[in-house]
Image (tube, grey):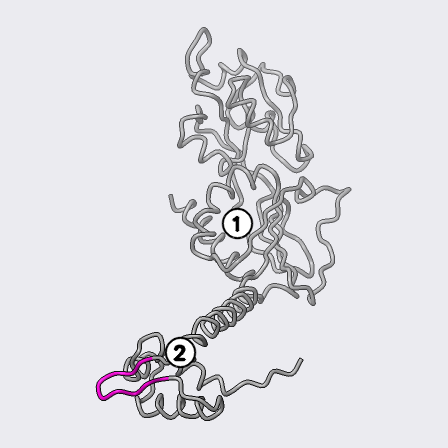
Amino acid sequence: MVYRLPPLTALRAFEAAARHLSFKQAAEELYVTPGAISQQIKALEDYLGKPLFERLPREVRLLPVGEAMLPKLREGFECLASAVEATRTQQQVETLHVNAPPSFASRWLMPRLTRFTEHYPEIDLRLSSSADNIDNPDTPATHDVDPRTDVSEISIRYGNGDYPGHRVSQIFNPLLVVACSPLLLEGEHPLRTPEDLQWHVLIHDDTVPETDLPTWADWMRAAGVENIEPRKGPRFDNTLALEAAIDGLGVVLVLKPLIAGAVQKGRLVIPFETTVSSRHGYYLVVAEALAERPAVMTFCDWLLAEAAEERDE
């Protein structure tokens, strides 16, 4: 459909003048002179073939034809503004998919995401978790991406950091510590020394192959503990292993950054100073084709800053 309309500047001048009942105030709003407003309205009146205002010495008044025109014109401007704003907002929002190992997502990343979403509302962040983000000989460490898509994707991986074709940044290379419920520091066999572990259930994290993560045997060797069978006890994946420890089922060997929140809230304690180092760590992994996108760079800078702050603490 072809619309025969007068110039938009003339319609804007009329709407502002009619709303204020003042050419001067309309001029201030539109950053022009009162004479320019008068000329625009005169041009509109010539186009319509009838006057819209009654011009008096100190004021202007809307004539009935102007009063009838104003509500529809204002509604039209509101529709235009809404359409423009919707388009502008849609263009500004960037969709960012972040995929992380389950424990990292729930224990470390989720408690911090409020700060990110408050500071960067223009980024549509979508978080998912998968054990596929833990290096495993049977699971490919990377996947192909299409740089033409509007969606950016970031992976957080637990592994060795060797991901060809990707931009890789280490988040942290964490130590493993022993953690348990505060309840285990009391009772018939309170945990006071590493030897007291003989009275407690050893919880095993079965998410990562034992060849890639220190085990209870490694920790006991570092602590100088003998005569305790390091392989005894139930096995869980990482998220359930932490929940079992929080519920008081036993003692878990866990990556220290994952329990910072639970320790701060008093749900877990670290009874011993002995630690063991992991050969692997957590890495931020982004395909080179996506690495320079604004949303990707913003999230990566934010996450690495959060990790650096925790290391400093």
Res 171 label:
1
Q: How many marks?
A: 2
Task: From the image, tell me which residue sits under label 2.
Answer: 64
Q: Position of residue 108 (x, y in %)?
A: 50, 40
Badge 1: how crowded within 10 Å, few (<14), some, or many (20+)? many
Q: Position of residue 64 (x, y in %)?
A: 40, 78
Q: Position of residue 207 (x, y in %)?
A: 66, 33
Left or right of 204, for residue 181? left
Q: Report the mark closest to the observer, 1 or 2.
A: 2
Q: Quadrant of the C terminus?
A: top left
Left or right of 137, for residue 22? left
Q: Residue furthest top?
A: 188
Toward the viewer: 90 or 268? 90
Q: Which amino acid does the dot numbered 1 rest on?
A: Ile
Q: Residue furthest left?
A: 58
Q: Quadrant of the N terminus?
A: bottom right
Badge 2: how crowded within 10 Å, few (<14), some, or many (20+)? few
Q: Is residue 294 magenta?
A: no
> Magenta residues?
53-61
**Secondary element at tag 1:** strand
N-term mark: 1 or 2: 2
**Secondary element at tag 2:** helix
Dividing the picture into quadrants, the one containing residue 12 is: bottom left
The span from disc 1 to disc 2 (Cα, nearest Å) is 69 Å
Point 46% across, 45% down: residue: 112
